[in-house]
Image: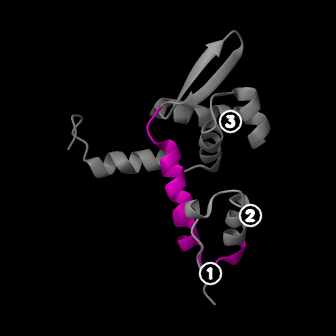
Amino acid sequence: MNDAGIPLYEAKAAFFRVLGHPVRIRVLELLQEGPLPVRKLRGAIGVEPAALSQQLAVLRRSGIVTATRTGTTVVYELAGGDVAGLLGAARRTLPVVLTGRGELLAELRRADAGRAPAELPRVQEAS
């Protein structure tokens, strides 16, 4: 157990619940490239401002991202840790999980077409 008396597996589960929304995952993917203002995040993700604000608040409260305000502009960035490594591990795991689900696997491969082969292992689809 940690200092708060919460078992580590429960803390891990809470962390993964924070990642359990497509908009939050997309925000983290975008922030891997560096800090971005909210308007650019909104343009890249294409959701309503209130929906994005809600998801950014979840990420901010969890400590995964930080926000800096300059005038009326709010810029978000990754707080640290190895979020990029975690997202990379998910990408490497997805081909195995999606084997037999051809359309989703094809979409993942299209999205990663520019990545090095070592980053995305090729998996044979089940017949």
* Label whose residue precedes the other's in the sequence (1 or 3): 3
Q: Using the numbered discs, state the Cα–Cα distance from disc 2 to disc 3 in whole angstroms.
A: 26 Å
User: Can see residue 47?
Assistant: no
Asked if residue 44 is positioned above or below residue 22 in the image, the reply reads above
| Residue type pointed to by label 3 | Leu
Residue 95 lies in the magenta stretch = yes
Residue under numbered circle 3 = 52
* Label whose residue precedes the other's in the sequence (1 or 2): 1
Q: Which is nearer the eye, 115 or 47?
A: 115
Residue under numbered circle 1 = 100
Residue under numbered circle 2 = 110
Residue 6 relative to residue 60: left or right: left
Q: Using the numbered discs, state the Cα–Cα distance from disc 1 to disc 2 in whole angstroms.
A: 17 Å
Residue 78 pos. (x, y %)? 54, 33
Q: Secondary structure at mark 1?
A: loop
**On-image quarter of the C terminus:** bottom right
Q: Secondary structure at mark 3?
A: helix
**On-image quarter of the N terminus:** top left
The magenta segment:
80-103
* Label whose residue precedes the other's in the sequence (2 or 3): 3
* Circles 1 and 3: CB atoms closer than 8 Å: no
Q: Residues within 10 Å of mark 3 (few under 14, many from 20)?
A: some
Q: Which is nearer the eye, 119 or 52?
A: 119
Residue 10 relative to residue 121: left or right: left
Circle 1 or circle 3, nearest the eye: 1
Q: Residue at x 34, y 45 (%)?
A: 11
